[in-house]
Image (tube, rainbow, N blue to C red):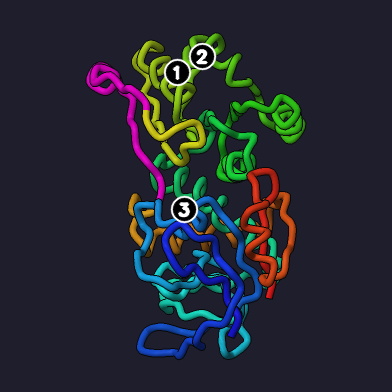
Amino acid sequence: MKAAIVSAAGERPVYGDFPEPQAEGDHVVVSVKAAAISQLAKSRAAGTHYSADSHYPFITGIDGTGTLSNGEPVYFLAFKAPWGSMAERTLVPAAAVVPLPATLDPVLAAAIANPGMSSWAALTRRAQLQQGETVLINGATGTSGGLAVRIAKHLGAGKIIATGRNRDVLDQLRAQGVDITLTLDELPGALPALMKEGIDVVLDYLWGQSALDIMQAAVAGGEKAVRFVQIGSLSGQEISLHSKLLRSSGLTLMGSGLGSVSDAELIACISEMLNAAAESDFSIAFQMRPLSDVAQAWQEDDSRSRTVFTL
């Protein structure tokens, strides 16, 4: 069968032949319909993510949509090497498969699953968002952050504050119902007043200086506890965080990613999010490419539009 294959650490995937998977034990074969490039898929393929496997060669891709042998449409997670999602067929644990809503386009489902899961898990499992609470999304102009805006509204956020670098995208988010938009340059000056009004949950896709600014303002803003959920690090992997920020305040700092919730809870989050997507508009910009274009598409992929391989 054809697949996107990584042969060594640091190499980009190439389109080639790979042995057919065989159903065994509690694993099932999925005939793949669509699989998307994500930052997680990229970093696992490069061997730089903490969850990456060091066995080569393997099929890249962490999730996708397809059908079981009985024709049932499903979404699946494919984390166990060598069976990634970017192949004509793959082998996945039966527990990592969820039914796909009949009204949800499988290509759109593949596009939104990973970015949607990040904010769904962060809001429902980590921050435990309550109806009417205020959510600040730091880095809302990217694909994941923009989708987080709609998911937060769906889950009952009372007020949404969005930050980012791109003013034009922020204006679009304002038109979509975001209450307050701020560029990263405007953020430090606005934070004291925002914290005084009250921010309950922060979803952080950036880390770096803006994340530190938010945490420092939360500590200086009074007694109200702020649940800060770290999801992505587009502005850098490290910050200098003084211990008193956590000792002297109600600030709660937590992460949301692989390992922060159990595998069973992760699957449950994705199932809940996909069922919600069948009823609400969780659409995002994406482009379809044949899997045979993987080498070129992998290099061209950026955060403005998801690349979804179709088979």
- Is the C-beta separation of discs 3 and 1 under 8 Å? no
| Residue at 59% in and 15% down | 185
Q: Which kind of residue does numbered mark 1 sit on?
A: Asp
Question: Magenta span has 13?
Answer: no
- Is the C-beta separation of discs 2 and 1 under 8 Å? yes
Quote the CA–CA distance across marks 2 and 3: 33 Å
Mark 2, residue position = 191
| Residue at 44% in and 71% down | 96
The mark nearer the N terminus, 3 or 1, is 3
**Nearer mark to the viewer, of 2 and 3:** 3
Q: Which kind of residue does numbered mark 2 sit on?
A: Leu
Quote the CA–CA distance across marks 2 and 1: 8 Å
Q: Which kind of residue does numbered mark 3 sit on?
A: Ser
Mark 1 is surrounded, within 10 Å at the Cα level, by few (under 14), some (14 to 19) or many (20 or more) other residues, namely some
**Image coords of residue 225 (percent x, y):** 36, 24
**Image coords of residue 170 (percent x, y):** 70, 28
Viewer-side residue, 46 vs 247 = 46
Mark 3, residue position = 43
The boundaries of the magenta stretch are 239-257
Rendered view: 282 above or below 202: below
- Is the C-beta separation of discs 2 and 3 under 8 Å? no
Secondary structure found at label 2: helix
Quadrant of the image containing the N terminus: bottom right
**Nearer mark to the viewer, of 3 and 1:** 3
Mark 1, residue position = 213
